[in-house]
Image (spheres, rainbow, N blue to C red):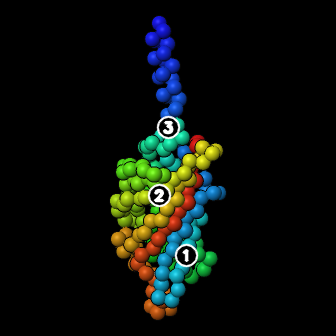
Amino acid sequence: MKVLYVFLVFILTITSATAQESYSVNNETSTILIKGTSSVHDWESNAEEFTGSAIFTITEGDLQSIENLAFSVNAQSIKSGKRIMDNKTKDALDAKKNPQITFEFLSLEEIKNDTVKVNGNLTMAGVTKEIMLTGAFQIEDDGSILVSGNQPIDMENYSIQPPTAMMGALKTGKDVDVEYRINFLKN
């Protein structure tokens, strides 16, 4: 009987130290910034509307696994504060036909030294490509998980023609950097 009791205590201790939990993106404390270049000056835009969810496994305060990760940005919500540029961005993304930019988790590559690498499908302008997404993560005191990083993207890989203006005198570069700081809260 004593052995059974010790075994049950051991099992309960292990299961209480490991928790697979569902999380959602906190839009109020999360940011997505898109940065690019042009023949005249550098530019940046903010994604103002996005949603996301994840299932994380945490053991004794350490991130052990990611079971799912999904993210969606409203392409119409990408804004620079300059109306002409915003319209050109929406046109380049074909935002009327493809209103969402999405990332869908495929697999966990590694978790090491507060860095996580995941494989997933990124869909923009109706084109889907598999990418490796690398980010730093931090488990906050309140149990939320902050993931931040920078993802370079070649727009031409997604059949997006870099926007031009002033009859071609201003040309944007084909590469953009997406800087993200995403705060996931427990559901």
Q: Residue at x 47, y 6 (%)?
A: 1
The secondary element bearing badge 1 is classed as: strand
Q: Nearer the viewer, residue 66 or 62?
A: 62
Give the CA distance from mark 3 to mark 1: 38 Å
Provide residue 103's location: percent of width, then percent of height.
Answer: 44, 57
Q: Is residue 127 above or below residue 146?
A: below
| Residue under numbered circle 3 | 59
The quadrant in which residue 134 appears is: bottom left
Q: Is residue 160 above or below residue 116?
A: below
Provide residue 105's location: percent of width, then percent of height.
Answer: 41, 51
Three-letter code, disc 3: Thr
The earlier-in-sequence mark between 3 and 1 is 1
The quadrant in which residue 64 appears is: top left
Provide residue 157's location: percent of width, then percent of height.
Answer: 35, 71
Q: Nearer the viewer, mark 3 or mark 1?
A: 3
| Residue under numbered circle 1 | 44
The earlier-in-sequence mark between 3 and 2 is 3
Three-letter code, disc 2: Gly
In the displayed structure, does residue 133 sit left or right of residue 74?
left
Q: Nearer the viewer, mark 1 or mark 2?
A: 2
Q: Residue at x 48, y 28 (%)?
A: 14
For the residues bearing labels 1 and 2, Cβ distance under 8 angstroms: no
The residue carrying pointer 1 sits among few (fewer than 14), some (14 to 19) or many (20 or more) residues within 10 Å by Cα, namely: some
Q: Which mark is residue 135?
A: 2
Provide residue 119's location: percent of width, then percent of height.
Answer: 37, 54
The quadrant in which residue 87 appears is: bottom right
The residue carrying pointer 2 sits among few (fewer than 14), some (14 to 19) or many (20 or more) residues within 10 Å by Cα, namely: some
Is residue 63 in view?
Answer: yes
For the residues bearing labels 3 and 1, Cβ distance under 8 angstroms: no
The secondary element bearing badge 2 is classed as: strand
